[in-house]
Amino acid sequence: MTDSELWYARADHIPVLGHRGICAHYPENTLPSFRAAIELGVDLIEFDVNQTRDGELVVIHDNSIDRTSDRKGLTRDYTLAELKSFDFGSHFSADYRGEQIPTLREVLTLASQSRRDLLLNVEIKDMAHDTVDRTVAMLHEFGLAERSVIACFDAEIIRYTKAAHPEMRTQGFPGRYMDNFTEETYDAMFGMGIPIGGSTTDEQIVQDVAFARAHGILAWLFCADTPADVRRCVQFCADNITGNDPAVALNTLRAMGLHA
């Protein structure tokens, strides 16, 4: 199977994505979380990229470090050395006290040394063109560009990525969820992240999936953390399923004969 074919669901296999690794059981966006997801057997890992004050790329969901570290402030206000001295594990559990923020290079090193079929969902969080450019350059450096998709909630970043790096796959969201949205954004999308929780109705999910299919975009549904939600995603004809606890999706799909 080629790298390109890995992105597509088959009759016997719906890909499963680990959200920030396995963020239900490990501190999110950390190396232990990503290692656990890879060992579990997910098809994709998802992580988020921000830039430090000294221009290093680090993996953290928020633009600030308030929620996931023992310090406060914007990621861009600190150097990498400063961020590496902070605790990014204790917010989750004392068992992870002292866990460091990973650099993008550390995450890509892990990914490049893992299974050849592992795919990467790389979300640009600081909405900056230079972050896109430097992220794409590093993906190429590690030989992982073909196995990666660049995601963002800012439609302008999606359009920029596709224009500046036409070889890259991109993932956006239904237009109502995106900043700076224009209809042309859909032309740049390879995948569309479609939420299944919150106030989203089944009718809206069906409409979003149908819209994605009509535009040649893969429908990637998130987040399914109960067997019932995984079965709903199957009924909605998901092209992949994201989980905070991806073991739930893996086990449910395997029982249904839908994850080889």
Image (cartoon, rainbow, N blue to C red):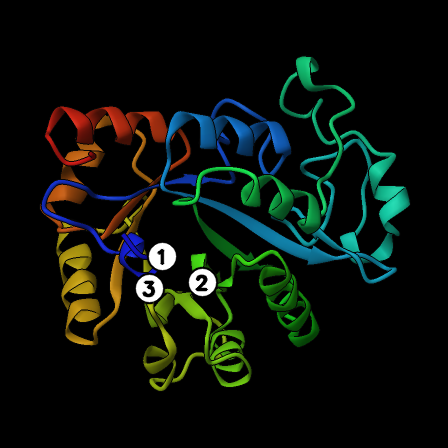
- Measured in 3D between alpha carbons, the distance from the residue under mark 2 to the one under mark 1, in whole angstroms, is 7 Å
- Measured in 3D between alpha carbons, the distance from the residue under mark 1 to the one under mark 3, in whole angstroms, is 15 Å
Where 206 falls versus 241 (above or below)?
Answer: below
Q: Nearer the viewer, residue 143 or 62?
A: 143
Where 42 falls versus 44 (above or below)?
Answer: above
Whether residue 77 sits left or right of residue 178 in the image: it is right
Does dot 2 land on a helix, a strand or a loop?
A: helix
Q: In x, y percent, where is residue 200?
A: 26, 51
The residue tagged 3 is 191
The residue tagged 1 is 3
Q: Which residue: 42% across, 68% down? A: 170
Does dot 3 land on a helix, a strand or a loop?
A: strand
- Residues under numbered marks 1 and 3 in contact, where contact means CB atoms less than 8 Å apart: no
Q: In x, y percent, where is residue 11?
A: 9, 46
Nearer the observer: mark 2 or 3; the answer is: 2
Q: Disc 3 marks which amino acid? A: Gly
Q: Which residue: 73% across, 41% down? A: 66
Residue 142 lies in quadrant: bottom right
- Measured in 3D between alpha carbons, the distance from the residue under mark 2 to the one under mark 3, in whole angstroms, is 14 Å
Q: In x, y percent, where is residue 231?
A: 14, 35
Pick whichever of labels 1 and 3 is earlier in the sequence: 1
